[in-house]
Image (spheres, helix red, strand yellow):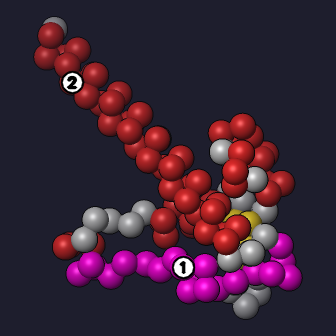
Amino acid sequence: MELFILLFLLIVIYFVLTFLRTKHIIGKLVKLFNNASAIDYNSAKTLEEIGIRQQSFVERLYKIPDHRYRILHHLVAKNVVKTTEDNRYYLSFEELNKHFGNDIPEDVQ
């Protein structure tokens, strides 16, 4: 029984830490979009201009994984980050507030 409780607590801790890390990375992505002024269709930027790129397989082996690229595509799926026809990206504050509400820090809105 004690082993079961310990295993349960470890699983809960894992999911809480994953949630907090994801929330932190979303805040970083919002700041990157703000700094690049990619906040509407006319000011949309490429991922390179924003400062986001996918790590190569070799980089993931010897560096700390950068989850921004994966979470960016999660935000695109939720329509928080929108794309243009020419593959540029911009942040939709309306969708950001709709999906995350008060969970986004004040300084990035």
Q: Is residue 82 visible?
A: no
Q: Is residue 47 above or below residue 73?
A: below
Question: Residue drawn at (86%, 82%), measured in percent from left and top?
Answer: 42
Label 2 secondary element: helix
For the residues bearing labels 1 and 2, Cβ distance under 8 angstroms: no
Which of the 4 image quarters holds residue 78? bottom right
Q: Name the amino acid type tagged 1.
A: Gly
Mark 2 highlights which residue? 7
Q: Name the amino acid type tagged 2.
A: Leu
Which of the 4 image quarters holds residue 82? bottom right
Q: Residue furthest bottom?
A: 86
Question: Residue drawn at (84%, 77%), measured in percent from left and top?
Answer: 41
Label 1 secondary element: loop
Mark nearest the camera among 1 and 2 is 1
* Residue 27 image offset from top left, x and y in percent: 59, 54
Classify residue 96 as left or right of residue 76: right
* Residue 93 image offset from top left, x and y in percent: 79, 57
Q: Quadrant of the N terminus?
A: top left
- Within 10 Å of disc 1 (Cα), the crowding (few <14, some 14-19, many 20+) is few
Magenta stretch holds residue 94? no
* Residue 50 image offset from top left, x and y in percent: 61, 79
Mark 1 highlights which residue? 51
Question: Residue drawn at (74%, 75%), measured in percent from left and top?
Answer: 38
Classify residue 90 as left or right of residue 3: right
Q: Which residues are magenta?
A: 40-59
The residues tagged by marks 1 and 2 sit, at their Cα atoms, a distance apart of: 39 Å
